[in-house]
Image (spheres, helix red, strand yellow):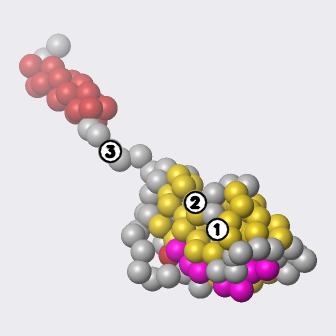
């Protein structure tokens, strides 16, 4: 093999090995790490603070929180602008005793939309 060609092969091999060793942060879908109210929990009403924390940055402007009432009606909750980048917060007010579901939809930093629901019960205070 000619010296120039050998150097080129060595360079290509070195570049391939270096590419495998570079630590590139992996893009991950949003995973719910913690919530308040917690899944299947009982909370005191009538006002219930809502907080969802995820494993990645969330685009709060393109995310949604919807409260599903015991009668099946829905109410969009206003997401607070004063939260960390991985958290959505809101306030559900005037809730009567009963079974509710918090439906969430978030746009994560990787560009993927993730959805879920958190059932919970409001008890009379």
Instruction: Examine the image and state in which quarter residue 105 appears.
Output: bottom right
Outermost residue toward the top in this view: 1
- Separation of disc 1 and disc 2 at Cα? 14 Å
Residue 92 location in percent, x, y? 65, 80
Residue 41 location in percent, x, y? 70, 57
| Residue lying at 90% horizontally and 77% vertically, measured from the top left | 71
**Residue 62 magenta-highlighted:** no
Task: Give the crowd class for mark 3: few <14, some 14-19, many >=20 residues within 10 Å.
Answer: few
> Image height check: is 32 above or below 13?
below
Outermost residue toward the right in this view: 71
Which is more N-terminal, label 2 or label 1? 2
Q: Who is closer to the viewer here, 82 or 96?
A: 96
Which is more N-terminal, label 3 or label 1? 3
Residue picked out by circle 2: 35
Q: Is residue 62 visible?
A: no
Magenta stretch: give its range: 89-96
Q: Which element carries disc 2, helix, strand or loop?
A: strand
- Separation of disc 1 and disc 3 at Cα? 27 Å
Q: Is residue 54 visible?
A: yes
Task: Give the crowd class for mark 2: few <14, some 14-19, many >=20 residues within 10 Å.
Answer: some
> Image height check: is 2 above or below 74?
above
Of tags 1 and 3, the one toward the viewer is 1
Q: Who is closer to the viewer here, 6 or 107?
A: 107
| Residue lying at 39% horizontally and 70% vertically, measured from the top left | 84
Q: Which element carries disc 3, helix, strand or loop?
A: loop
| In the displayed structure image, the side of residue 19 where residue 125 appears, left or right | right
Residue picked out by circle 1: 105
Residue 8 location in percent, x, y? 17, 28
| Residue lying at 41% horizontally and 80% vertically, measured from the top left | 82
Residue picked out by circle 3: 24
């Amino acid at each position: 093999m000619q010296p120039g060609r050998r150097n080129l092969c060595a360079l290509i091999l070195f570049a391939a090995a270096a590419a495998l060793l570079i630590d590139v942060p992996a893009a991950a879908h949003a995973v719910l790490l913690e919530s308040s109210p917690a899944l299947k929990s009982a909370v005191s009403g009538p006002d219930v603070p809502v907080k969802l924390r995820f494993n990645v940055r969330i685009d709060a402007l393109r995310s949604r929180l919807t409260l599903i009432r015991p009668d099946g009606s829905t109410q969009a909750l206003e997401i607070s602008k004063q939260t960390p980048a991985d958290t959505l917060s809101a306030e559900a007010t005037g809730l009567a005793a009963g079974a509710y579901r918090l439906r969430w939809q978030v746009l994560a930093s990787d560009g993927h939309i993730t959805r879920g629901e958190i059932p919970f019960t409001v008890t009379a205070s």
